[in-house]
Image: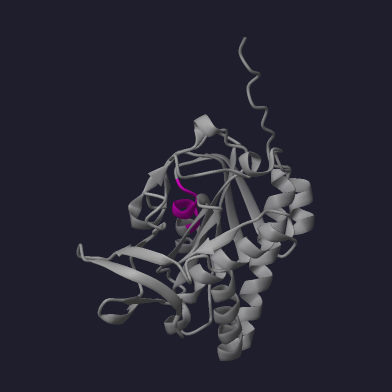
Amino acid sequence: MTSDPVRRTSLDPVPLAALAPDLLVEVLETATSTNAVAAERAREGAEEGLVVVAEHQTAGRGRLDRSWETPARSSLTFSLLLRPSAPAADWPWLPLLAGYTVTKALRAEGYDVGVKWPNDVLAGDRKLVGILVERVETPTGPAAVLGIGLNVSLTAGELPVPAATSLALESGAEPDRTHLLGELLRSLREAYDVWQAGGAEATARLRSSYAAACVTVGRDVRVDLPGGRVLTGRATGIDEVGRLVVRGADGETVVGAGDVVHVRSATSGHDQ
């Protein structure tokens, strides 16, 4: 006896328009990468607030050029176009802002999640959300494309990697993707606007809130750094520009880029 296939519904643009009235949401049936589409729209002159959503993303791209594909309508894959007026030196906070805001929004929906530095969202030890922020040069100035991939109704057999999970697997029920997308977009736009308007004070608040929500802080970690070097130690905090502070054998090191692995205790026998 075979189980029934998962029934997945399309996004409904009507409530989306009501949930995110100050955003222009474009829903595509298929796209190779929503970040690539949004970047092209930005170069063509699209204004801040454009959202490109794909019901089926066939060549999604994450940090370190990792790629993945998920079944149609099983996830939320979308990109938000921003044109920050904040100084370029503050732009590295955008990925952390996105990771923290998505974590906060999902917690408000009842999910037990945390943000792993810099911007993966985890449920327990398993990856639920991937985020990639890219800078795009356009004729009217630089833009930022904030891409998010959230596993919604993926079954265990559909997960892209064994260390992933989905909202359905975590809760036992498939959430309403339209409602969830609207809440994420509303939260992201609100958090971004507050950060932009608040200057250094808002960044300091973001740093504090992010550190409190970050499940990497306080953990033993292994960091694969650019160039092949490996750093091991205890993650102790987030510095004033959003870098991870790691205390190792040679003292404290700040990490601005690298692949972080949470190291379990010796009794568990493996990493995460």
Q: Position of residue 266 (x, y in %)?
A: 37, 56
> Which residue lies at the image location 58% right of the left edge and 88% below the top edge?
199
Does 36 appear in magenta? Answer: yes
Residue projecting furthest to the front? 267
- Foreground pick, 41 / 106: 106
- Establish if 152 lies above or below 245: above
Q: Which quarter of the figure has residue 40?
A: bottom left
Is residue 47 visible to us here? no
Q: Main secondary structure of the magenta part?
A: helix
Determine whether, in the image, residue 100 is placed left or right of residue 263. Answer: right
Q: How many marks?
A: 0
Q: Quadrant of residue 103?
A: bottom right
Q: At x 56% / y 86%, what residue is drawn?
A: 204
Point out residue 195 in the picture as x, y percentages from the top left corner. 61, 80
Q: Nearer the viewer, residue 131 or 14?
A: 131
In the rendered image, residue 124, in percent from the top left (x then y), is placed at 56, 53
Nearer-the-camera pick, 44 or 128: 128
- Hey, which residue is sitting farthest bottom in the picture? 200
Q: How is the image coloured?
A: one colour
- Residue lying at 65% horizontally and 68% vertically, measured from the top left: 189
Range covered by the magenta-colored residues = 33-38
